[in-house]
Amino acid sequence: MEALPLKPFACAAAVMAALMFGSAPALADESESANGGGGHNVVQVVNRVDGRLNVRGRVDFNIITGPTVRPVNAAYAYSSCNGCQTLAVALQINLISMTATDIRPVNLSKAINYSCHDCLTVADAVQYTIAVADPERVEPRVEELFDTMQAELAAARSTPSLTVAVADIDAVLVQFVDLANSLIAAKDATAEPTTPGAGPPPADLSP
């Protein structure tokens, strides 16, 4: 895939600015970062339908063999409806070399409401950056983590309750407590009618 024209952190920040202020960023959901330091996983969902539960998530897997480690993982959820629930989940697993010297993974989440009454919005970003002797040799425990996350996201898309989906994702983290030292988790949730500074949802993001 083509490299993004912006640095990874700037791209993630552009999505947040778009959601807060209504402008539309030009970026791909997935791409190798411009500096070669890892993947770029951005999950964004906008819910405009009254009474609807809208769930979107993705698991991203990266093998980073070089000295620079700068993968980006970001979840953004935006609601502008009545009695609705919205969940964005970004899950990223990065295998890196023990000899890596520039290790700066980015993990972001933001939940935003705009003119949203009786609604709940959650953004959940979960990022594992695991140092191993050979990043190209995937250990069974890492494969198990990937498969478990994939299955949980598939189940979350059809769950009748946002709170159940969030609890089930949290339960996955508990199952892999042995990898907790490599984990960065960021969760943002809001039930307020309008998030301070938020504007109408961008027209060109998900419906």
Image (tube, rainbow, N blue to C red):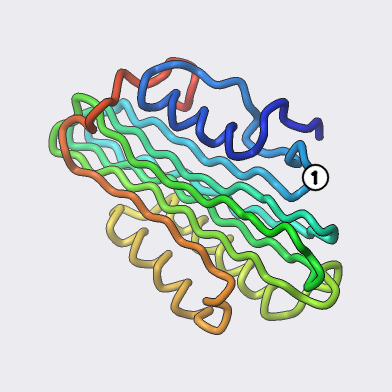
Q: Position of residue 147 (x, y in %)?
A: 63, 67
- How would you rate the neighbour count of disc 1 (Cα within 10 Å): few for under 14, some for 14-19, many for 20 or more? some
Residue 207 appears in view? no
Residue 186 appears in view? yes
Q: Is residue 20 above or below residue 39?
A: above
Q: Is residue 87 found left or right of 59 in the rendered image? A: left
In this orientation, which residue lies closer to the viewer: 52 or 199?
A: 199
The residue at 67%/28% (across/down) is 6
The residue at 29%/37% (across/down) is 52
Find disc 1 in the rendering and name its residue.
Answer: 36
Q: Quadrant of the C terminus?
A: top left
Number of numbered discs overlaid on the protein picture: 1
The residue at 72%/30% (across/down) is 4
Q: Is residue 95 found left or right of 73 in the rendered image? A: right
Q: Is residue 151 above or below residue 3?
A: below
- Residue 85: name its quadrant: top left
Q: Quadrant of the N terminus?
A: top right
Q: Position of residue 46 (x, y in %)?
A: 39, 30
In this orientation, which residue lies closer to the viewer: 100 or 30?
A: 100
Give, as a three-letter code, the residue at label 1.
Gly
Q: Position of residue 84 (x, y in %)?
A: 24, 37
- Residue 33: name its quadrant: top right
Q: Position of residue 123 (x, y in %)?
A: 39, 47
The residue at 72%/26% (across/down) is 5
In this orientation, which residue lies closer to the viewer: 204 or 192?
A: 192
Task: Kindly give the residue lying farthest to the front in the view shown.
Answer: 101
Task: Kindly give the residue lying farthest to the bottom in the view shown.
Answer: 178
Dot 1: element = loop
